[in-house]
Amino acid sequence: MSELFCWFCSGIYWPIKYTLLHDVVLCLLKRWYRLCHSASRPFLVLPPLMEWIRVSVAQAEHRRSFSVDSDDIRQAARLLLPGVDCEPRQLKTDDCFCASRKLDAASTEAKFLQDLGFRMLNCGRTDLVKQAVNLLGPDGINSMSEQGMTPLMYACVRGDEAMVQMLLDAGADINSEVPNTVHKHPSVYPETRQGTPLTFAVLHGHVPVVQLLLDARANVEGSLQDGMENYTETPLQLASAAGNFELVSLLLERGADPMVGTLYRNGISTAPQGDLNSYSLAAAHGHRNVFRKLLSQTEKGKGDVLSLEEILAEGTEEERGLEERSPSQLDLVRTGKAKLKALREAMYHSSEHGHVDITIDIRSLGVPWTLHTWLESLRTCFLQHRRPLIQGLLKEFSCIEEEEYTQELITHGLPLLFQILRASKNEVISQQLSVIFTQCYGPYPIPKLTEIKRKQTSRLDPHFLNNKDMSDVTFLVEGKPFYAHKVLLFTASGRFKSLLANRPAAENTCIEISHVKYNIFLLVMQYLYCGGTEHLHIRNTEVMELLSAAKFFQLEALQRHCEVICSKNINTETCVEIYSHTKFLDSPELAAYIEGYFLKNMVVLIELEPFKTLLYDTPPGSPATNVLLDLEKTLGIRIQSIHLSSSKGSIV
């Protein structure tokens, strides 16, 4: 064990630029040794020693440190060992032992003295402030550690109110910032850049320290200056995200702006929707009381600011002639529009994170729905079984502009809506969903079924129809003979050709047709001998049987003619029966037409028992079992053709 310890401490075969302190190495080796000799876990499944070192060094690299300390080992254990956890790393001064090796003797001595000064201040002894300041170097009380933090910042992190007061009395800069550059302060945490003492006090929830700093005239917006873009979170943003109502109230009283958001260095927003201002952070984390406090503070004392309804009614600036307005009126409009944008962003984040109560609160202020926020809110209510809210949201669908009907409505919206219809047999919800489906289907007519022009084939004079003297093939239908001609039937369809080819060789042998009625077979033959459907007289009671026969004999033009007749006979009383027969016969074109009829007239149909039975009580194994899935598919195609295609409604 001692030999292994010396080997690591000597740095032999240690290619990484980070150095392990002797006590840390000893801690690491002892922990590894105990695990290797533990009876609870076999040696082969334990993390190897080099894996411990790799993860520990990664922890040090993340915090921009030159040394690996014991906390890095604990964090490595949290990652490598199941069931092991530890608290997050706290902000504190790093040991400067390794960094000092790169300096000359004088600089190393100054570094050690500065490190000692920080340690004296971090111990909480207010009587050592004067001695500690003398050790910090030329910058005195405002000296920064390698992490870019001043003694006042560390005191705010700890919540040491007495030390904060002593440091302020000693002249500490109350608005000092963690620098962005890493040249002079190489161990600056990326998350703490531009942080101020107030930022750290708010971050750790130390209300008395925040009160003390604000009383000492600390900048309530942290590092943000007037007219400048913000690249880090303000204290109010941090308090809103944490849900600390007391801190939020205190910061708002001191003039913090909830409209301020955060930008990246290149000016791009940090969030896909907006810049995560205080409204959005409170909404995203579900802090409803904080969100309402932010709203009340914004409205307080601003009775002359335009309401959201007035802003929405303003229209474009060009349309309203803003050049004729006074500068104060222009400022009110711009402020109202900025607030509307901020609330839209908050609405997006609250719906994304499932905080539907906050979303409803924002909607009650007059903020319009987007399709995405409406769908996410509806999904949350459905998962939480909140029926009253589901009914309210379904009623609100009519408020969504048709421009919002995007691909998301097809890929995510329709599956959700039909899932709610399938799961909930509540009459109110079913009626509301019917209204939505009819609205999505649009005012355009149902796409018509068109006749198929039959190619000209062999045809015979109707005189030869069922003529015994001149026939060469006989069919037996319902026990009655039917006389026909092979020359015509061979070219009529593949089904007739197969029947004739498989006919027994014996003479005068009849081909039996067992599943078609005689009158229906006669209509089929009339169609073939006359060469079209013009001379057919089909009764409404025969059309479905003729459709079945046409499909069996593979006569597409006759089948389509029957489908056209069926489509003209559809009404609220017959549609369900015709649809059931259509699904049984597997006629997709006619089924799609009837599904369009269902969707267009669903508000009326949903009240009828046959239609309810079709939706909810279709027996398993029935061809119409997946009627809801078919309706969803048909409606998706319809929305695609009306709202998403380049023709915008001409394809119907």
Image (cartoon, helix red, strand yellow):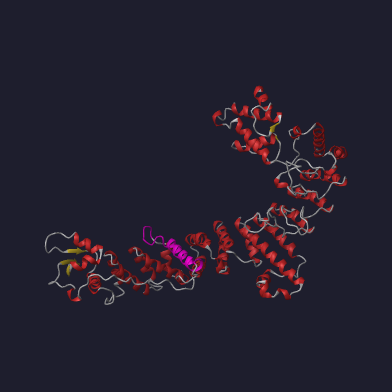
Left or right for 571, reference 102? left
Left or right for 526, reference 624? left
38 shown above or below 139: above
User: Which quadrant holds the N terminus?
Assistant: top right
Residue at far top of view: 3
639 shown above or below 249: below
Residue at far front of view: 104
For the residue pair 241 and 605, the one nearer the viewer reads as 241
**Main secondary-structure element of the magenta-colored stretch:** helix
70 shown above or below 280: above
For the residue pair 594 and 289, the one nearer the viewer reads as 594
Asked whether the viewer can see residue 271, the reply is yes
Question: Splitting the image into 4 quarters, where does residue 49 fall?
Answer: top right
**Residue 51 % position (x, y):** 60, 33
57 shown above or below 636: above
**Residue 641 % position (x, y):** 47, 67
User: Which quadrant holds the C terminus?
Assistant: bottom left
**Residue 74 % position (x, y):** 66, 36
Q: Which portion, as a residue range, is magenta? A: 619-645
Does 27 lie within the magenta span?
Answer: no
